Image: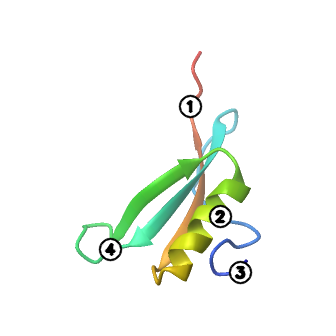
Amino acid sequence: MSENACPEAASMASCPGGMARQFRVQVWNGETPSHWKLVGSFADLRDACRCAEQLQDAGEQIRVVACRLPTAA
């Protein structure tokens, strides 16, 4: 797997503790205001990496962002 597709440590969004970790795979899209479009969200980094690798192999510029989301109370 390419290091570009899934780095050892995915980009980490700032977030408080006690929240569920999630990995978001995004592709570069110059037509959107943020320039990044969400492709998928994964609970497991390996699944996110597989998705990212497939997109990169298809010629897409990708990134994997790790973030934490609130869990149901």
Q: Dot 1 lies on which element?
A: loop
Q: Which residue is mark 3?
A: 3
Q: Which residue is mark 1?
A: 70
Q: Dot 3 lies on which element?
A: loop
Q: Look at label 4 and name its amino acid.
A: Asn
Residue 38: percent from the left, percent from the top? 41, 58
Q: Quadrant of the C terminus?
A: top right
Q: Which residue is mark 4?
A: 29
Could you say which is closer to the camera, residue 20 or residue 57?
Answer: 57
Q: Dot 4 lies on which element?
A: loop
| Residue at the (46%, 64%) spot, across then down | 26
Pointer 1: residues within 10 angstroms few (<14), some, or many (20+)?
few
Pointer 4: residues within 10 angstroms few (<14), some, or many (20+)?
some
Q: Look at label 1 and name its amino acid.
A: Pro
Cα distance in 3D space between marks 4 and 3: 21 Å
Query: Could you tell me if the residues under marks 4 and 3 are in contact, i.e. CB atoms within 8 Å?
Result: no
Residue 43: percent from the left, percent from the top? 65, 44
Residue reaching furthest top? 73
Could you say which is closer to the camera, residue 62 or residue 18?
Answer: 62
Q: Mark 2 or mark 3, which has the lower sequence index?
A: 3
Cα distance in 3D space between marks 4 and 2: 20 Å
Q: Mark 3 or mark 1, which has the lower sequence index?
A: 3
The answer, for residue 11, to whether it is visible in the render is: no
Cα distance in 3D space between marks 1 and 4: 27 Å
| Residue at the (70%, 81%) spot, across then down | 2
Query: Could you tell me if the residues under marks 2 and 3 are in contact, i.e. CB atoms within 8 Å?
Result: no
Could you say which is closer to the camera, residue 44 or residue 10?
Answer: 44
The relative height of residue 39 versus residue 9 in the rendered view (above or below) is above
Q: Nearer the viewer, mark 1 or mark 2?
A: 2
Q: Nearer the viewer, mark 2 or mark 3?
A: 2
The answer, for residue 58, to whether it is visible in the render is: yes
Q: Look at label 2 and name its amino acid.
A: Arg
